């Protein structure tokens, strides 16, 4: 799910999801689960933000400088 959908599930603001995700990641790992992150991707050139350590949404593509980006997706399993 996206940060927006997580915010709906957990009841916190979308921009706070990025701040809370490291904590959420820790608490799910204590339950033997993990968060799988599909990195944000540029919809223009396909550049994937795989090295991105933070959970926030990037502003624009470093490769083509467009801001037509797909938000990162998160899955708990
Ligand atoms: Zn791009």
Image: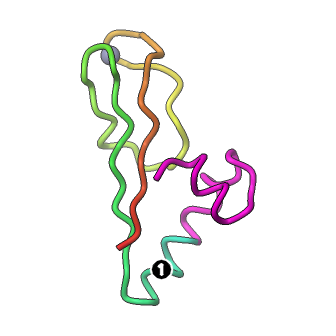
What residue is shown with label 1?
A: 28
Q: Say which quadrant the C terminus sits in.
A: bottom left
* Residue 67 as seen in the image, left or right of residue 8: left
Residue 7, x across and y down, in percent: 66, 55
Residue 64, x across and y down, in percent: 33, 10
Our reading of the magenta stretch's main secondary structure is helix
Quarter of the render that holds ligand 1:
top left
Residue 53 position (above or below residue 20): above
Residue 3 position (above or below residue 47): below
Magenta stretch encompasses residue 17: yes
* Residue 60 as seen in the image, left or right of residue 9: left
Residue 5 position (above or below residue 58): below
Neighbor class of circle 1 (other Cα within 10 Å; few <14, some 14-19, many 20+) is some
> At x 57% / y 51%, what residue is drawn?
5
Residue interval drawn in magenta = 1-23
Residue 75, x across and y down, in percent: 39, 61
* Residue 7 as seen in the image, left or right of residue 73: right
Question: In the image as oriented, which residue stretches furthest toward the bottom?
Answer: 31
């Amino acid at each position: 799910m996206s940060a927006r959908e997580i915010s709906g599930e957990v009841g916190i603001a979308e921009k706070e999801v990025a701040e809370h995700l490291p904590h959420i990641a820790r608490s799910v790992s204590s339950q033997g689960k993990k968060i799988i992150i599909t990195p944000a991707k540029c919809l223009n050139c396909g550049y994937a933000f795989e090295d991105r350590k933070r959970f926030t949404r990037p502003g624009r593509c470093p490769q083509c400088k467009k801001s037509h980006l797909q938000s990162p997706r998160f899955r708990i399993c």
